[in-house]
Image (spheres, rainbow, N blue to C red):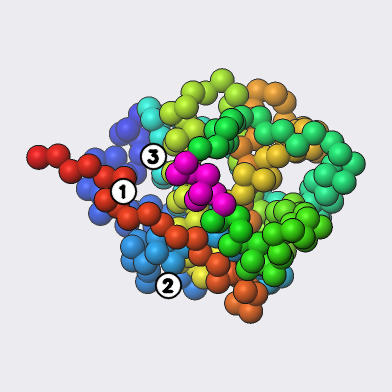
Amino acid sequence: MNDTARPDAGLTQEAAAELRLGMLTDPGLPRRALHVEEAVLERRSARAFLPTEIPRSALRRILEVARWAPSGSNIQPWKVHVLTGDALARFSAALLAAMHNGEPRKMEYDYYMPKWREPYLARRRECGFGLYAANGVRREDMAGRTRVQERNYVFFGAPAGMLFWIPSDLGHGSWLDYGMFIHTITLVARAYGLATIAQGALGECPHVAHRMFGVGDDFKLIGGLSIGYADPNDPVNRFQPSRIDIDEFTTWLE
């Protein structure tokens, strides 16, 4: 597109933002005056949602904002399926059936390292054991651990979910860009009082999504996201894994 044809061409950052805000969909929900720092610090992965429906207009508004996330050379590699109602229920049922039938659970990319090592192994264990404890599941309770895992496939009871796809031939840089896009969704959602959880687990049975939604192998399924109102009475939503101190990962050079 020729820049001269864009209404925000040549404007300052502040003026462009004001113009774009006026062009967004009415979300049908109140928006908090939320500083970006507060949104980052508030955000956590919710694992229990209320069934309260979200207006489609709100989901559209969140994606309209998230599309302004940066991407290398502005290629914008996102492809999103928004699931609600019957589509969400059918996909959840298909995932559970695949799991119970012993169908392959193999992501289309390596999310984690092939062999765990420290310090990442300890962090993973802390998170996993803490999560099971928050769900009231003991380490040796394998059936309980399976139930916890299955909650991923029903979007933790959320009324809406998203699936994220990326063109198969794009490189690592575009995957980094996609992370910023997904994180932007989680932050914008906070302004509308909504909680989220990004889920690699929704990409564990990619053949199910490819088949159900008619997506060819020219796209890979990254995973998905649940979005809705967090259940304030479920103890799992008070679980928060620790974060390392910045001096553990930062080198100051002058």
Specify whether residue 90 is painted magenta: no
**Which segment is the magenta one?**
118-125
Residue 150: name its quadrant: bottom right
Secondary structure mostly taken by the magenta-highlighted segment of the chain = helix
The residue labelled by disc 2 is 32
Earlier residue among tags 2 and 3: 2
* Amino acid under disc 3: Pro
Residue 164 in which image quadrant: top right
- Where disc 2 sits, the SS reads loop
Alpha-carbon distance for marks 2 and 3? Answer: 24 Å
Q: Which residue is mark 3?
A: 70
What residue sits right under mark 1 in the picture? 248
Q: Which badge, 2 or 1, is on the more N-terminal residue?
A: 2
Gap in angstroms between the C-alphas marked 2 and 1: 34 Å
Q: Please give the name of the residue rendered at 37% of the width and 67% of the height, measured from the top-left corner.
A: 38
The secondary structure type at the circle numbered 1 is helix
Residue placed furthest toward the bottom: 233
Q: Pick the residue in front: 126 or 229.
A: 126
Residue 139 pos. (x, y %) = 69, 59
